[in-house]
Image: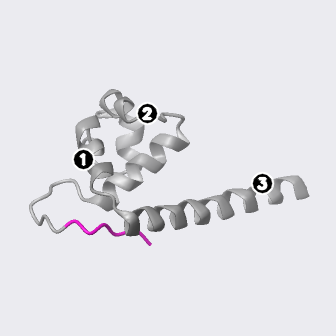
Amino acid sequence: MFKTNDTAWFRILKDDANLMQVVYQIISTYFEDDRADELTNEPVMTAILEKDALASQPTLSRFFNRMDEDTLSQLNQVIRELRKIIYSKKTEIHAF
């Protein structure tokens, strides 16, 4: 559902991995990009994302700067899908 128009083949941290890190940071209540530097070697987060180290704040800033209108539309779709999943779980919990 998410692909940027980035054509740099040499990039070590790919945009899909950066997006996953941002999503997990938000879920973990780390809302600001600069919190990424605190989490770079955080063991739980690196294990969840199956990485040796997470992207730094400058890497995430460059990731956000590469976004264009198409990418932002895709990001909105990802957020909508995540909300559907979260709200369905909330409904299941209340059903009990």
Amino acid marked by disc 3: Lys
Percent from the top left, x then y, of residue 72?
43, 61
Q: In this view, does 40 lie above or below 2?
A: above
Percent from the top left, x then y, of residue 81?
59, 66
| Gap in angstroms between the C-alphas marked 1 and 2 | 14 Å
Query: Are dots 3 and 1 in contact, CB under 8 Å?
Result: no
Image point (68%, 56%), residue name? 86
User: What segment is highlighted magenta in the picture?
Assistant: 1-6
Secondary structure predominantly adopted by residues drawn in magenta = loop
Earlier residue among tags 2 and 3: 2
Tag 2, which secondary structure? loop
Tag 1, which secondary structure? helix
Q: Residue 95 carries which label?
A: none
From the image, which quarter does the C terminus lie in? Answer: bottom right
Image point (75%, 62%), residue name? 88
| Gap in angstroms between the C-alphas marked 3 and 1 | 35 Å
3 or 1: mark nearer the eye: 1
Earlier residue among tags 1 and 2: 2
Tag 3, which secondary structure? helix
Q: Dot 3 corresponds to which residue?
A: 90
Amino acid marked by disc 2: Glu
Q: Which residue lies furthest to the bottom in this view?
A: 1
Q: In which quarter of the image is residue 40?
A: top left
Q: Dot 2 corresponds to which residue?
A: 32
Q: How many labels does the image show?
A: 3
Amino acid marked by disc 1: Arg
Mark 1 closeness class: few <14, some 14–19, many ≥20 residues within 10 Å? few
Q: Is residue 8 left or right of residue 74?
A: left
Q: Dot 1 corresponds to which residue?
A: 62
Mark 3 closeness class: few <14, some 14–19, many ≥20 residues within 10 Å? few
Image point (23%, 43%), residue name? 59
Q: In which quarter of the image is residue 55?
A: top left
